[in-house]
Image (tube, helix red, strand yellow):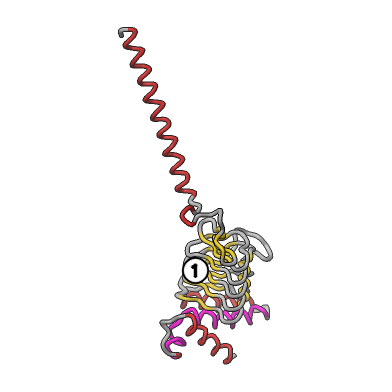
Amino acid sequence: MFKRMKEDIETVFDQDPAARTSIEVILTYSGLHAIWAHRVAHALYNRKMYFAARVISQINRFFTGIEIHPGAVIGRRFFIDHGMGVVIGETCEIGNNVTVYQGVTLGGTGKEKGKRHPTIEDNALIATGAKVLGNITIGKNSKIGAGSVVLKDVPPNSTVVGIPGRVVVRDGVRIKDLNHCDLPDPVSDKCTEMDKKIAQLQEEISQLRKEISEGVSIDGH
């Protein structure tokens, strides 16, 4: 147990340049506290002590702002940076050397039964505010951009951005059919479509007015 705790502290120093001393990390890093509390809750959950596990999980949430279901499986050297608002679902599986930032949700998409939360493979990074939803897999060494919403599997060694999330880099090569400046924006697309429709209607109204005016002039009325 103490060996794992030492490894957790070393992970903080590896990932966060703001970390100065071990005592500071132990006393002030809420992400570290959340991981340690989850280990206790998860051990109780595996022993079918579900109520006690959920109580510890909720106390953990109250003090750290990080909600990790006791059923979630988390690997080694997991790092939560500025963890406020992080949510990790019951059937979520997280590999080794994974990093998540504040506001990340690893959740479900509805009322499915069974495996309904993501699997995050080794060395993945999920940036601020990203939402990874459903029984999908984020491949090894992949990165999810800030604010992205990911609903489909992500291949290994990929970078995903946008809403919905799309792969823009795979194995170090930019995907040619997607311009980073043209990421999907359904709200903007709809507004553009409405602007075009309004312009078309205005043109038709102007034409009708012109025809009516010319007709009145010819008739002398």
Q: Quadrant of residue 17?
A: bottom left
Residue at position x 36%, y 25% in the image: 206
Q: Which residues are magenta?
A: 23-46
Please state which amino acid type lies under the numbered disc 1.
Ala
Question: Going by the image, does 74 lie left or right of 185?
Answer: right
Question: Going by the image, does 62 lie left or right of 78?
Answer: left
Most common SS among magenta residues:
helix
The residue nearer to you, when weighing 146 against 83, is 146
The residue nearer to you, when weighing 161 against 35, is 161
Q: Which residue is mark 1?
A: 127
- Which element type, helix, strand or loop, lies under badge 1? loop
Queried whether the magenta region covers residue 5, the answer comes back as no
Which quadrant holds the C terminus? top left
Q: Position of residue 41 (x, y in %)?
A: 59, 80
Q: Residues within 10 Å of mark 1 (few under 14, many from 20)?
A: many
Which quadrant holds the N terminus? bottom right
Queried whether the magenta region covers residue 39, the answer comes back as yes
Residue at position x 47%, y 74% in the image: 83
- Work out whether 205 lies above or below 161: above
Residue at position x 58%, y 75% in the image: 123
The residue nearer to you, when weighing 189 against 103, is 189
Q: Is residue 52 visible?
A: no
Question: Going by the image, does 126 lie left or right of 18?
Answer: right
Q: Position of residue 182 (x, y in %)?
A: 48, 52
Q: Quadrant of residue 78?
A: bottom right
- Work out whether 177 lies above or below 221: below
Q: Position of residue 92 (x, y in %)?
A: 62, 70
Question: Going by the image, does 175 lie left or right of 103?
Answer: right
Q: Position of residue 58 (x, y in %)?
A: 53, 75
